[in-house]
Amino acid sequence: MVSWMICRLVVLVFGMLCPAYASYKAVKTKNIREYVRWMMYWIVFALFMAAEIITDIFISWFPFYYEIKMAFVLWLLSPYTKGASLLYRKFVHPSLSRHEKEIDAYIVQAKERSYETVLTFGKRGLNIAASAAVQAATKGTGLGACRTATPRMSVGQILRQSPGCQPGPERSR
């Protein structure tokens, strides 16, 4: 439990906050080399975070798992080891370059499907709302309407109105 908490703190501070500030400085100074360095870091770190979800579920029981994870984040960030740059150049960039067309096609397909899904659920939602409004309106004209108090009724008349829906004085006119 302690290892998990320390690991979360290390990943937060050294994996996200420090690189976020360094990225801010790179953008502010318009230093292209630093900008490229931090873009590579964020791509590798995003892949690490995606893999972390799976590894936390299945192999977090492994001895020194959290310690290894902390060391990996520090290795990615270190300007001496340039871990993120190394992983990006050796593995990530070649892999993404090989599969770029398929990934782009999948993203376009996902966008189209998500748009169609939103429209379908929107139409269903509107149909359900319209049906509910129609049902409420039809119930209002049935038995429930004769129990409705009118502005001309006194409090006593409202209280005396029976469940059998006997008409009040203003309804018998």
Image: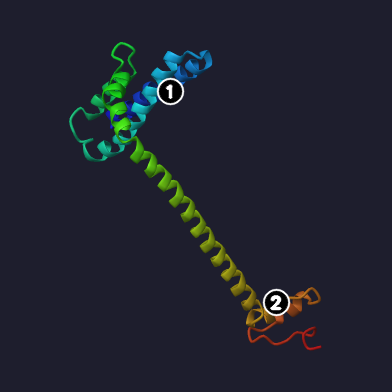
The vertical placement of 139 against 22, above or below, is: below
Per the image, label 1 sits on a secondary structure element best described as helix
Give the mark nearest the N terminus, 2 or 1.
Answer: 1
Front-lying residue, 28 or 139: 28
| Residue that appears at 32% across and 32% down | 96
- Kind of residue at disc 1: Leu
Front-lying residue, 71 or 152: 71
User: Crowding at label 2, few (<14), some or many (≥20) Cα neighbours within 10 Å?
Assistant: few
The vertical placement of 142 against 67, above or below, is: below
In the rendered structure, the answer to whether residue 90 lies left or right of residue 137 reads left
Q: CA distance from mark 2 to mark 1?
A: 61 Å
**Residue 91: image x %, image y %?**
26, 26
| Residue that appears at 49% across and 59% down | 120
Residue carrying label 2: 148
The quarter holding residue 77 reads top left
The vertical placement of 157 against 87, above or below, is: below
Q: Quadrant of the C terminus?
A: bottom right
**Residue 169: image x %, image y %?**
79, 85
- Kind of residue at disc 2: Thr
| Residue that appears at 42% across and 14% down | 33
| Residue that appears at 46% across and 19% down | 23
The quarter holding residue 32 reads top left
Q: Looking at the image, how many numbered discs can be counted on the residues?
A: 2
**Residue 146: image x %, image y %?**
69, 82
Residue carrying label 1: 17
